[in-house]
Amino acid sequence: MSNITKQFDSTPITFNDGGWFNATEAAKAFEKETAQWLRLPSTVEYMTALAEAIPVKITGLVATKRGQNGGTWLHPKLGVAFARWPDVRFAVWCDAQIDAIMRGAQTIKAERSALRVEFAPMTDAIVRARQEGSGIYAIKCASNSRLYIGSAVSFRRRVAVHLCMLRAGKHHSKKLQRAWDKYGSDKFMFGVIEVVPEKSGLIAREQHWIDALDACGSGMNSNPVAGSVLGRKHSAETRAKLSASHKGKPGRPHTDESKALLSAAHAGKKLTQEHRKKLSEAKAGQLKVITDDVVRRVLDARASGMSYVRAAKHCGVSESTAFRAVKLIDLFRRRHHDALIAELHILGA
């Protein structure tokens, strides 16, 4: 089941799509402990009566979870009774949230029951047999009945792409890829939910079916927003890998075409005085970090006939530092040209 986080007076309260909620998290918000409430005689009496009415074992009303979102989770029917303990307002709010979640679950169940899709095994044969067409499709795992919803300009090409990525273990939906690896390719089927002749309407209809069938929450979609990566959350491990992969790498070089477009976009723009001042201060700061020793060594290297690249390597600095060191001296000479000429005349006298 997927988790749903709601806000009560700016405090996050976590539910799952079955209406259960994290009582440990809620109790902390009111500086209380769930164990205290569970030990109350009135609580034990209520749980006994509720277990008989549902019916379910009394232990089936409470679940303990470890790790992320860990704590004591309570059955929807028990959750509202718990919510009355710390605060009556919280109980009213909690009742409304659970009701909305349960009604939403019933709507999704009804949509799935009404869904009539002819599924076929995801094999190379389906690629050859599938007619061209655009619309909304579903990939279904027979082992757990979970769905992946997508849109396609060409059903034939799209299913071929899915097969290629899944077989290579590089599908963008980690949920779908893990299910494929776990259950095997023979458990997956492809079917068309809706034909959409107008390609401009694909994203809107895909979003409708993602929401209607809860394809991101209880299905195998990674993104809650159709045609976008909005809402996708990378794991801490993935974020660390992305960060490590970009360290020490130069930025992507611009093509001549992109340079021309950037130049045209900035043509005629005038910088404000404040912006000019900030740029000046930033550049001045860059020049100050170049020590006199670096300047001397770079000048000596250049005087010996070395290029900027070789001079930079010889002095153990970057090419830009070597270039700025020389430009710094040129700037100094231009600004103090008259004073230097006068001093030369005095020395020569």
Image (cartoon, rainbow, N blue to C red):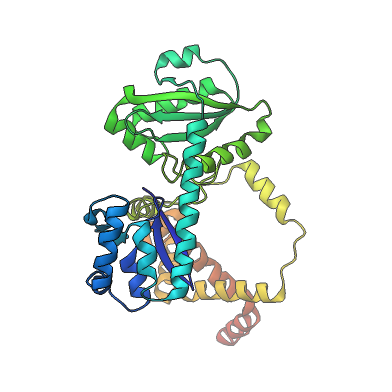
Residue 307 seen by the camera: no
Q: Quadrant of the C terminus?
A: bottom right
Determine whether 78 is above or below 120 in the image.
below
In terms of depth relative to the viewer, which is nearer, 293 or 82?
Answer: 82
Q: Position of residue 38 (x, y in %)?
A: 25, 69
Q: Position of residue 129 (x, y in %)?
A: 49, 12
Indicate left or right for 248 with 251 as reference.
left
In terms of depth relative to the viewer, which is nearer, 276 or 68?
Answer: 68
Give me the residue at 49% from left, 49% from top.
103
Residue 19 seen by the camera: yes
Q: Position of residue 157 (x, y in %)?
A: 52, 22
Determine whether 230 is above or below 276 in the image.
above
Q: Residue furthest right?
A: 268
Give me the residue at 37% from left, 40% from top.
175
In terms of depth relative to the viewer, which is nearer, 43 or 317?
Answer: 43
Give me the residue at 63% from left, 78% from top.
335
Q: Quadrant location of residue 136?
A: top right
Q: Position of residue 22 (x, y in %)?
A: 34, 62
Indicate left or right for 3 with 62 as reference.
right
In terms of depth relative to the viewer, which is nearer, 203 or 194?
Answer: 194
Give me the residue at 72% from left, 72% from top.
272
How many numbered circles does the render carry?
0
